[in-house]
Image (spheres, grey):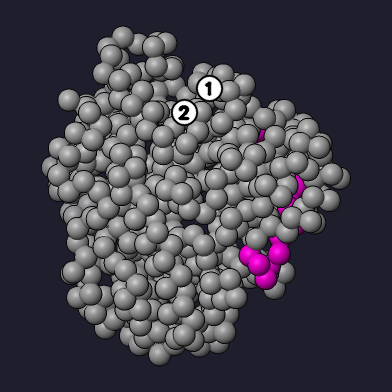
Amino acid sequence: MSEKLNEIRKILEKHSEMLQNAIPLIASENITSPAVDEACASDFSHRYAEGWVGERVYAGTEYIDKIETICMELARQYFDCVHADVRPISGVVANLAMYNAFTSRNNGKMLIMPIPKGGHISHAPKYTKSGRAIYGTAGTVRGLEIEYMAFDNDEMNIDPEETAKIIREFEPELVLFGGSVFLFPHPVKELVDVAKEVGASVGYDAAHVAGLIGSGYFQDPLKEGADCMTMSTHKTLPGPQHGAITTDKEDLVEDLKSNTFPALLSNHHLHNVAGLAVALTEMLEFGKKYHKQVIENAKALGQALNERGMNVLCEHKGFTESHQIVLDIVNFKDSIGLGGDIERILEKANIIINRNLLPWDIKEGRHYMNPGGLRLGTSEVTRLGMGKSEMEAIADFFEQLIVQEKDPLLVKDEVAEFRKQYQSIKYCFQDSNKAYEYLKFY
C-alpha cells in the first residue's frame, strides 16, 4: 500500500508542478489564497451540521454556527441582499434548490439560454426536441419542459424583443438568465415585467460572474428584478468549490431555505463554508480592484489576440464586459484544426484553455468535442498578478502556436520562463492572521 501512497503523492506533486509552470486560462476556475486553504483544511471537514443555524440535527456545532453566521453576513454585505444561503455544495445544487422553489415537478416549464449558445447543462432538458438524450439537470432531476430564449449571434446576447414573444407564448414558470458563455450583462430589467405578466418567477445563474456582481461590476440582477440569484463560489468569486443562493425578497426566504435543506442537502461541506467566509472577506477588501483588473485584462487579451490574426468575437463591443472572451478559430481548420485540436496544442505548451461551441457550430455540423471556438478567462492569471502587458505576452504565445505553428514543446519552455515571475497570489491577505483579524474571528 505504501507504493500506492507514493504514487498518489507523486501524481499530486506533478500536477502542482505543471500548474506552477502553466498559463491557466480556464474561465470556470480560479485559485484560492493561503488563508482560504487554511480554513478549508480545518477540522470542519470532519463534521456534520444538518439544518439551519440554531436548528441543527447534531450537537457540537456551536463554533460551526458562528462561522456559518459570519459567512452569511459577509455574503449579504458583499451582494447587498436581504438573504444569503451558503449551504449549497455547488452551483448546480443551488440551481436545483431554485427549481424546487419555482417550478412544478414533471409538468413545470422553464425558459433558458440556448445550450449551444452559452447556456449551462444544469439548465437543460433530459432530451432535445428531436429526442436525442442530453441528460441536463433540470430535465433529468426535475422533469422540466424546457424552451429556449432567442439569441442574437452578432451581439452574443439574449434578444429581448424576440424573447418577450417567446415568454408570452410559452408561459414558463421560471425564466432563467445566466450561462457558461457570459460576455455581456443579460437583459433582466428589459424582460422581468414580461415574465411577471405570465406569472413566471425570474432566476439568475451567476456562477461565472458572481465576483463581478459582488464587486459592483457587470450588473445587479436582484436590483433589476430577479427573484433569486444562484452561484458557484470558485470562478470570479475566488473561494472554494461551493455554492450559494441570494434573494432580496423576504417572502421567498423560507421557501428557498426549505428547498435547500431538507429537500437536497444533508451535511453541506462545512470546511468550504469556512473557506468561503475567508474568501468573502478578501473580496470585500480587495474585490473592486481585483475585478476591475480582471475585466480590463479580458478586454486587453481580446484586443491583443485580434491584432495577431485571431478572430475574437464582438470586437464592435470591446470583446467583453466580463472575465471571458470567445475566439472563432474556424479559419485555422485547414492548417492546425478546430477547437479540440487547438486546445491540445496549447496544452502541450502548458497553456490551459477550453474548446467551446460557437452559436452557429451545430448548424454547421461541428460537435462539442471539436467545435469552432475557444473560451478564455482572465480570473486566475489576474490573481497571479498579471496585467495588460502580460496579456500581450500571452497573445504572443497564441500567435506562435496558432498562426506561426511553432512546436509547442519549444513554446512550453518560454511559457515556464514567463510564469516564473508569477508564483504568488494577489488581491488577498498575504498573512492568514490578517484574514482572521478582518473576520473578527478571535
Along the viewing direction, whichever of 342 and 213 lies nearer the viewer: 213
**Contact (Cβ within 8 Å) of mark 1 with mark 2:** yes
Task: Residue 57: give x, y in percent of width and height.
Answer: 40, 10
Query: Which quadrant, please, contains the N terminus?
Result: top left
Residue at image mark 1: 257
Q: For the residue marked with disc 2, what is the amino acid?
A: Asp
Tell me the magenta residue range.
Answer: 140-156
Task: Residue 190: give x, y in percent of width and height.
Answer: 71, 50
Q: Is residue 298 above or below residue 35?
A: below
Q: Is residue 351 above or below residue 311?
A: above
Disc sitting over residue 39 in the figure = none
Q: Earlier in the sequence, mark 1 or mark 2?
A: 2
Task: Residue 189: give x, y in percent of width and height.
Answer: 67, 47
Report the number of numbered marks: 2
Answer whether residue 143 is visible to the viewer in this image: no
Residue at image mark 2: 85
Asked where in the image residue 152 lies, by quadrant, the reply is bottom right
In three-dimensional space, the C-alpha distance between marks 1 and 2, rounded to whole angstroms, equals: 7 Å
| Disc 2 residue crowd, few under 14, some 14–19, many 20+, Cα 10 Å | many
Query: Which quadrant, please, contains the C terminus?
Result: top left
Along the viewing direction, whichever of 371 and 434 lies nearer the viewer: 434
Asked where in the image residue 47 lies, by quadrant, the reply is top left
Q: Residue furthest toward the right?
A: 169
* 298 relative position to 185: left or right: left
As for residue 370 lying within the magenta part, the answer is no
Residue at x 59%, y 49% (from the top left corner):
178
* 25 relative position to 314: left or right: left
Q: For the residue marked with disc 1, what is the amino acid?
A: Lys
Residue at x 49%, y 81% (from the top left corner):
306
Along the viewing direction, whichever of 8 and 437 lies nearer the viewer: 437
